[in-house]
Structures are given as C-alpha cells and as structure tokens.
Image (cartoon, rainbow, N blue to C red):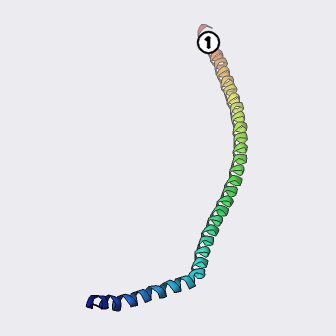
Amino acid sequence: MGDAQTWAYVLGAPAWLAFLVYLVRTVRDWPNIMAQWNARQRDKVDEKAQDWSRLRGEIERLDGRCERLEIAEEACRGELASAKGRLAELEGFMMGQGKARNDAAAIVATERLADRKAREGG
C-alpha cells in the first residue's frame, strides 16, 4: 500500500464507520421519527379544526346579533313612522291654531277700524 492509500484508509474507515452507525441509528429510530411527524401533523389538523369551530361559533353569534339588530331596526322604523304621524298631526293643529289666531286678529282689526270710523265719522 502506498502512503496516500494508507492515509485514505486510515481516515476513510472511521468516516464510513460513523456513517454506518448513523444509518443504523436512523433506521432504528425511524418509528419514533415518524410518530413525532404524525403527532405534529395531527396537531396541525386539530388547530385548523379548532379555528374552523371558533369561526363557526363567531358566525353564529354575529348572525344572531344581526337578527336582533334587524328586529330592533324594524321597531325603530315603526316608532319613527308613528312619530312622523304625530308630528304631522301636531303641525296641522298648530297651523289650524295659527289660522284661527289670524282670523281672530283680522276680526279684531275690522272691529277697531269700524269703531275708529264710527268715532271719526260719527
């Protein structure tokens, strides 16, 4: 054997031995490695399922709130329509009252004018 071959053998043999030891350990530990990988995949699936469950719950909660708000909106619209009706009625009453005051003022003015003419012409 030459000098270079001796050193290659001396350095190569432990490297191959280390590689074989690593390979044997990997093959022996392969079930544990796969178990960890499967557990990690299961955890990911569980997290996604929990997220979807949480989102479904949130959608149901918001849907219920939306329905309650729609009912409240309809009630408010009914109250608004009722208030508008009362307001129109009160405006009509106020206009009638104003017209009556104007008519009364016109009558009083006519009577005063007639009294003044009667005093001056009289």
From the viewer's perspective, is 112 left or right of 67? left
Which residue has dot 1 on it?
A: 119
- Using residue 14 as the reference point, say whether residue 92 is left or right of it: right
Q: Position of residue 120 (x, y in %)?
A: 58, 10
Identity, as a three-letter code, of the amino acid under mark 1 = Arg
The residue lying at 69 percent from left, 23 percent from top is: 100
Q: Quadrant of residue 16?
A: bottom left
Q: Position of residue 4 (x, y in %)?
A: 27, 88
Judging depth in this view, the residue of 95 and 88 nearest the camera is: 88
Residue at the extreme top: 121
Q: Residue pushed farthest front? A: 1
Q: Quadrant of residue 110?
A: top right
Q: Secondary structure at mark 1?
A: helix
Q: Is residue 22 above or below residue 39?
A: below
- 43, 27: nearer the viewer: 27
The number of numbered discs placed on residues in the rendered structure image is 1
Image coordinates of residue 55 in percent, x first then y, are 64, 60
Left or right, 64 with respect to 109, comes to: right
Look at the image and tell me in which quarter the C terminus lies.
top right
| Frontmost residue, 101 versus 83 | 83
Split into 4 quadrants, where in the image is the N terminus? bottom left
Residue at image location 72% in from the left, 31% down from the top: 89
Who's the residue at 64% across and 12% down the image? 114
Relative to residue 78, is residue 121 depicted above or below?
Answer: above
Q: Residues within 10 Å of mark 1 (few under 14, many from 20)?
A: few
Name the spot of residue 44 as percent of width and height, x first.
60, 69
Relative to 64, say whether 16 is above or below: below
